[in-house]
Amino acid sequence: MPSPTPTTTISSALHDRKTSAPVDPAALLIKATERLYTAFASVAFDPAMVRSPGSVTDADLAALGAPVAALPPEIVARFLVKAGTTWGGPDDIRRVVPRALELAADQQLLIDRGLLWAKVRWARWPNWPTYQVVTVRAFLRAEWGRLLRADPRPAHLAHRWLRHAADGVDDLGPFLHDWLDAIGPGTPPAHRRAATGHLVVLLLNSALRPDHPRTVRDVIPGRPDAVAQLTAWLTSPGTQDQLQRAAVALADTSDSRRVAVALERLHRFRAAVDRTSSETTSS
């Protein structure tokens, strides 16, 4: 199967330039969450699911049988840790996915997102009914859109979100497209500043080193296709152009110095990638 390219685009209300007013990314996520629960409402609780009585009690099982939207974070985390080994199978994971994704989006999931995606991948989520797969993807786009338009903070960084997303999805193209769009002049100033801030953090404060292109592997470890997509996105003329435009727009703000340094690092990264490609070709 050919590697996905970073140019994939999916229409989104968040980026519909025909709207007369900016769309609230938080409101879009709320709608996406509602659709997520609706799409999975038909997945019934199975009281006879596989479980190990030694590690999963009757009380645990009863707690998991509560309405999905009301499942406590502790129960969701406990179930996902054990799912596929001592508690439940693919359909049981599929049932709780809406709640797990909602909790993860709000930083309330008590397990690492990487583990969440490992379990969802094990449940073969791309093979679920099409309407459920589409709804999951739409939710992720809405979550990503909200994240980009909120200021970066330690538990809320775009490149870390992409790292975990790469554990669950095979194509980061739509997310990278959204990021570029969020940095553009069509985005409301506060949202544009936040989205630019996430790119600045990637270029200044992540494992990426501008003179050593291979370090992008440390940003998204173990996912070579995602690494290739992120590298192509960072070296694309569009990304440089949008960051340059953002630097001009933010010239009179407290972010101006960091954006300028980030732009310089992006130039160095692009040059290093070109140099590495030339050396590889000549050898």
Image: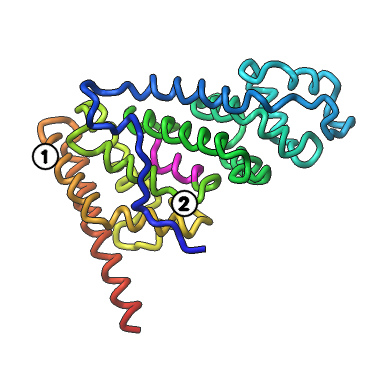
Q: CA distance from mark 2 to mark 1?
A: 30 Å
The answer to whether marks 2 and 1 mark residues whose Cβ atoms lie closer than 8 Å is no
Residue 176 at x, y percent in the picture = 35, 45
Amino acid type shown at disc 2? Ile
**Residue annotated with mark 2:** 220
The residue tagged with tag 1: helix, strand or loop? Answer: helix
The residue tagged with tag 2: helix, strand or loop? Answer: loop
Instruction: Report the front residue among 261 and 241.
Output: 241
Residue 231 at x, y percent in the picture = 35, 57
Q: Is residue 283 left or right of residue 103?
A: left
**Residue annotated with mark 1:** 248
Task: Give the mark nearest the N terminus, 2 or 1.
Answer: 2
**Residue visible at 30% across and 48% down in the picture:** 203
Magenta portion: prevailing SS class = helix
| Magenta region | 157-165
Q: 63 above or below 168?
A: above
